[in-house]
Image (spheres, rainbow, N blue to C red):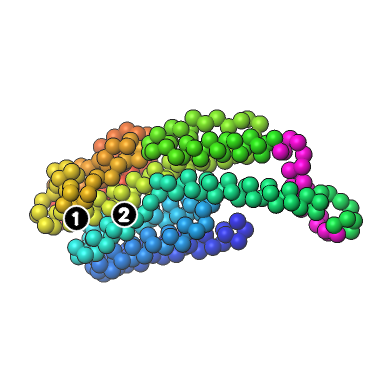
């Protein structure tokens, strides 16, 4: 991770720069290039897929959310071509977050097992010895002590408890949304296992953030579909199902309910949204009192404000 963190900072900076570039293109009125800028930001996240580590995954989720939050800005202030909107829809459809978190946790488990195996293989080298004696390793005591903990019975028991809890998490993440949210929260880590105690809250929060990101990506895709429908039909769809199957094969599900994403519209605009982690429909209140309530994409008709 010491080599990974600086690279992640650069990727987050690049995501912010792409977001600024999108805003600049919108200010110029260049809708198609603004869409291409969003597509570039979405594709940039693929660079992180080869590193299935929880920290890297959370950075990917943050970058995706930043790109999707630019979608309503583009749709409100520019008129991208139908081809550009189709391209945006296609790119958003290829983003597959629902199973990615489970893959990350499986990879974390592999890393843990590989580390344990390596420490066992190098047991003679890692055991504490006087400098210059035996293996000849000259490491200082603080550097060598953590590796030797594995050879104490209490540490082996703790690793065993952690691996059992981790297996339960992986099994829970195999469930469909939103069942996996409750399944992960219902797993009680052994109080004697400090690893699970530390990772458990992070995993639960990661699941909630994943759900929000899934909802955001799917809402952004539906917003692009609505714009295509509105241009051809010269009206807003009364319901999302009105666009199937001509414009979209099926309405994406809300990861927090398992039901279709919500949709509301009036003469001032429309909103496509997930009910969010409180699992309560707050009427499409995307932001209220600086707190995220529902979660999705709101597009305003600026000429009617």
Quarter of the image for residue 44 reads: bottom left
Mark 1 Cα shell of 10 Å, populated few (<14), some (14-19), many (≥20): many
Residue sitting at x 27%, y 57%: 89
Query: Magenta segment: does it hold 138?
Result: yes
Q: Is residue 14 left or right of residue 134?
A: left
Q: Is residue 55 visible?
A: no
Total of numbered circles in the picture?
2
Residue sitting at x 41%, y 65%: 17
The circle drawn on residue 111 is none
Sequence-first disc among 1 and 2: 2
Quadrant housing the N terminus: bottom right
Give the percent coordinates (x, y) of residue 34.
29, 65
Tag 2's secondary structure?
Answer: helix
Residue sitting at x 35%, y 40%: 255
Tag 1's secondary structure?
Answer: helix
Separation (CA) of disc 1 from disc 2: 16 Å
Magenta stretch in the rendered image = 136-156
Which label lies toward us, 1 or 2? 2
The circle drawn on residue 227 is 1
Residue sitting at x 33%, y 51%: 217
């Amino acid at each position: 991770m010491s080599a990974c963190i600086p690279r992640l900072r650069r990727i987050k900076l690049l995501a912010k720069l792409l977001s600024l570039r999108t805003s600049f293109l919108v200010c110029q009125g260049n809708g198609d290039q603004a869409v291409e800028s969003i597509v570039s930001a979405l594709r940039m996240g693929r660079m992180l897929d080869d590193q299935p580590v929880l920290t890297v995954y959370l950075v990917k989720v943050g970058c995706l959310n930043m790109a999707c939050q630019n979608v309503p800005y583009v749709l409100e202030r520019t008129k991208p071509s139908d081809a550009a909107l189709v391209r945006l829809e296609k790119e958003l459809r290829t983003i597959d977050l629902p199973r990615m978190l489970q893959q990350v946790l499986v990879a974390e488990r592999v890393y843990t097992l590989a580390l344990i195996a390596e420490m066992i293989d190098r047991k003679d080298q890692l055991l504490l010895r006087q400098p210059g004696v035996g293996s000849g390793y000259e490491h200082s005591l603080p550097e060598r002590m953590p590796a030797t903990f594995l050879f104490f019975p209490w540490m082996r028991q703790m690793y065993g408890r952690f691996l059992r809890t981790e297996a339960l998490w992986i099994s829970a993440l195999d469930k469909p949304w939103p069942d996996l949210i409750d399944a992960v929260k219902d797993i009680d880590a052994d109080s004697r296992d400090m690893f699970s105690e530390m990772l458990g809250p992070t995993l639960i929060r990661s699941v909630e953030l994943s759900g929000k990101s899934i909802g955001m990506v799917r809402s952004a895709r539906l917003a692009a579909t609505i714009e295509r429908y509105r241009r051809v039909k010269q009206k807003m769809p009364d319901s999302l199902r009105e666009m199937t199957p001509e414009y979209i094969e099926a309405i994406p599900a809300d990861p927090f309910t398992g039901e279709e994403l919500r949709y509301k519209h009036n003469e001032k605009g429309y909103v496509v949204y997930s009910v969010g982690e409180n699992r309560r429909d707050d009427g499409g209140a995307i932001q209220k009192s600086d707190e995220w309530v529902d979660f999705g994409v709101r597009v305003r008709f600026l000429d009617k404000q």
